[in-house]
Amino acid sequence: MTGPELNQVGNDLRVVLGRIVRRLRQGHQSGELTLSELSVLSRLDRGGTLPAGDVAEAEGISPQATSTILATLERQGLVSRDADADDGRRARMSATPAGRTLLAGRRSLNARRMTDALHEALTQDELRQLAEVIPLLERLVNRL
């Protein structure tokens, strides 16, 4: 594939993925967690107990923004803070049962919306093709 063709594929992929994310975001209700808060909470759910600095690095956001997000989540009872056993000055954060429950409900809603759209929009052959692309997208996201 030539440079201009590769640029076009990259741009088309960015646009269509952006549209998918925006459509899923449209399910966001006022007063719910922001996307950044959901992302941090999800990171803690998947990654277990982590120092705040590790969360910031993994999310690609500043330590200050991470601190603000974690404080908001903590006030809502969705994450808990414990002193690091090796360094009492550092905090280790983890998702609480309430945080995990919130995520499960949110994932379930978005999963249902996605499943319904897949069922309505794609044939069985297209669904198989899409499933084969997912590992490629995973590799791609790890390079961004």
Image (tube, grey):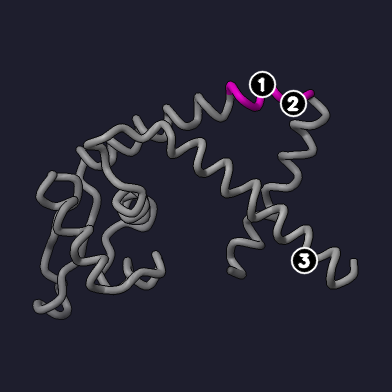
Q: Residue 55's x, y, as percent? A: 32, 66
Q: Residues within 10 Å of mark 3 (few under 14, many from 20)?
A: few
Q: Residue at x 68, y 47 (%)?
A: 134
The magenta stretch spans which residues?
Answer: 116-123
Quarter occupied by the C terminus: bottom right
Please name which of the two marks, 3 or 2, marks the residue nearer to the observer: 3
| Nearer-the-camera pick, 33 or 126 | 33
- Residue type at tag 2: Leu
Q: Residues within 10 Å of mark 1 (few under 14, many from 20)?
A: few
Q: Residue at point 72% right, 53% down?
A: 12
Q: Using the numbered discs, state the Cα–Cα distance from disc 1 to disc 2 in whole angstroms.
A: 6 Å
Q: Residue at x 68, y 52 (%)?
A: 135
The quarter holding residue 90 reads bottom left
Identify the disc placed on residue 105. none
Is residue 106 found inside the magenta-colored segment of the image?
no
Q: Which residue reaches farthest right? A: 1
Residue under the image location 65 percent in, 61 percent down: 139
Q: Is residue 4 above or below residue 39?
A: below
Residue 119: mark in rendering:
1
- Residue named by callout 3: 7
Residue type at mark 1 is His
- Residue type at mark 3? Asn
Residue 120's image quarter?
A: top right
* x and y percentages locating residue 125 in the rendered image: 83, 29
Label 2: element kind: loop
Q: Are marks 1 and 2 in contact (CB under 8 Å)?
A: yes
Q: Is residue 63 left or right of residue 22?
A: left
